[in-house]
Image: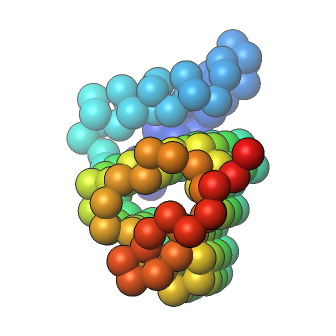
Amino acid sequence: AVKMDVVATVKAVARVNRIESSNISSELNSMKTMAGINTAVTGVGTAINTGATVDHDCNIQDYTHISVGSHVAGTVNIGKRVWLGIGSIVSNNLNICDDAYIGAGSVIVKDIFDNGVYYGVPAVKKKEIG
């Protein structure tokens, strides 16, 4: 119950003060740290589908899609407009940049710094975007 109260309070304050979503995350993380709470933070328009799991201390930016059966381990930062395909897995303590597309069943085991299409076990870049 305390976790939801902190999240609801930060979002309400952000709406009143018209804080941008990137600042909401930092404000929420500050409040979580003060309250001793480890939760995930999601941005505007983010979708986490049925059967997908997101562990503690994840920061998921705006318009990211986490497909059915995907798993995001703890302390992961995911950028804007990222697509995680069905059943994909993101290992602990990783970063995924904006505009990365991860294929179904892929396993991310290292940071992704360049936008593009990635798939495989382990996932590797297969196509450049833009």
- Quadrant housing the N terminus: bottom left
The quadrant of the rendering that contains the C terminus is: top right
Q: Residue at x 63, y 55 (%)?
A: 128
Pick out the residue farthest to the front: 127
Q: Residue at x 36, y 27 (%)?
A: 30
Q: Is residue 18 left or right of residue 61?
A: right
Please state which of residues 72 and 10 is positioned toward the viewer in this rendering.
72
Q: Nearer the viewer, residue 25 or 7?
A: 25
Asked whether 8 or 130 is in front, the reply is 130
Q: Is residue 6 visible?
A: yes
Please identify the quarter of the rendering in which residue 68 is found: bottom right
**Residue 38 horizontal/vertical position (percent):** 31, 50
For image coordinates 73% across by 17% down, the residue present is 18
Direction from residue 37 to residue 15 in the image, left or right? right
Residue 70 vertical position relative to residue 94 in the rendered view, above or below:
below
Q: Against 78, is 69 above or below?
A: below
**Residue located at (56% from left, 68% from top):** 126
Residue 111 image offset from top left, x and y in percent: 35, 53
Tell me if residue 61 comes above or below residue 124 in the rendering: above
